[in-house]
Image (tube, rainbow, N blue to C red):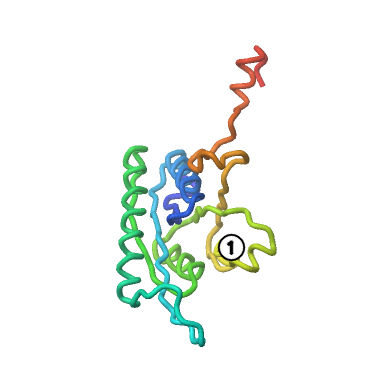
């Protein structure tokens, strides 16, 4: 029996989500595991301030737009899994704390691993922008695999591997590595 029977891959519209999807699907294929793609929908919280809102979207309209985006991202991920011949299901959840929502879903879907993308921000950036990944690592009942873009991959956010593999280097030099 394999270590992983069910792997949750967190997807969103970010540039590092495709990297997490690629790693998660490869891991699932290797272990013969099923994948659960998960999209965390933000709960629209209205701030109480004297400042006018930057965007004039009603909460129900905001939720419709976010759900539409989530459905699109989940559908794309599902197509990638089908192309890789990895069985999958899709799910989403709503919450003010995305990390809490993901951790809860991992338990509900009986996943043994959560795969998520990270921008690799420094401490100051995490303080300013927040970090779902850092909080998820703390809250998750199962291990969390954090994936980030390979260095130098700004031109292609979907590239999940370094540009040279050991086999590439060995074939050019004539020396197996």
Name, please, the residue furthest toward the right. 123
Whether residue 1 is visible: no
Residue sitting nearer the eye, 62 or 49: 49
Quadrant position of residue 161: top right
Residue carrying label 1: 137
Question: In the figure, is residue 44 to the left or right of 166?
Answer: left
Q: Position of residue 26 (x, y in %)?
A: 46, 40
Q: Residue at x 69, y 64 (%)?
A: 124
Q: Residue at x 62, y 41 (%)?
A: 151
Residue sitting nearer the eye, 40 or 48: 48
Q: Residue at x 48, y 68 (%)?
A: 98
Question: In the figure, is residue 85 to the left or right of 49?
Answer: left
Q: Does 124 sit above or below residue 83?
A: below
Residue sitting nearer the eye, 129 or 134: 129
Judge the density around disc 1: few (<14), some (14-19), many (≥20) Cα neighbours within 10 Å: some
Question: In the figure, is residue 32 to the left or right of 60?
Answer: right
């Amino acid at each position: 029996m394999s270590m992983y029977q069910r792997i949750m891959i967190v997807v969103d519209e970010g540039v590092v989500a495709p990297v997490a999807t690629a790693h998660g699907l490869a891991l699932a294929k290797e272990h013969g595991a099923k994948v659960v793609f998960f999209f965390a929908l933000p709960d629209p919280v209205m701030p109480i301030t004297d400042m006018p809102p930057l965007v004039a979207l009603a909460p129900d309209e905001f939720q419709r737009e976010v759900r539409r985006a989530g459905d699109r991202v989940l559908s794309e991920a599902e197509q990638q899994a089908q192309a890789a011949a990895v069985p999958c299901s899709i799910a989403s959840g709503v919450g003010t704390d995305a990390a809490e929502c993901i951790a809860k879903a991992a338990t509900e879907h009986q996943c043994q691993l959560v795969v998520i993308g990270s921008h690799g921000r420094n401490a100051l950036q995490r303080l300013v922008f927040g970090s779902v990944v850092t909080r998820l690592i703390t809250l998750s009942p199962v291990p969390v695999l954090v994936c980030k873009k390979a260095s130098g991959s700004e031109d292609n956010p979907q590239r999940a591997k370094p540009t040279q593999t050991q086999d590439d280097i060995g074939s050019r030099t004539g020396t197996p590595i």
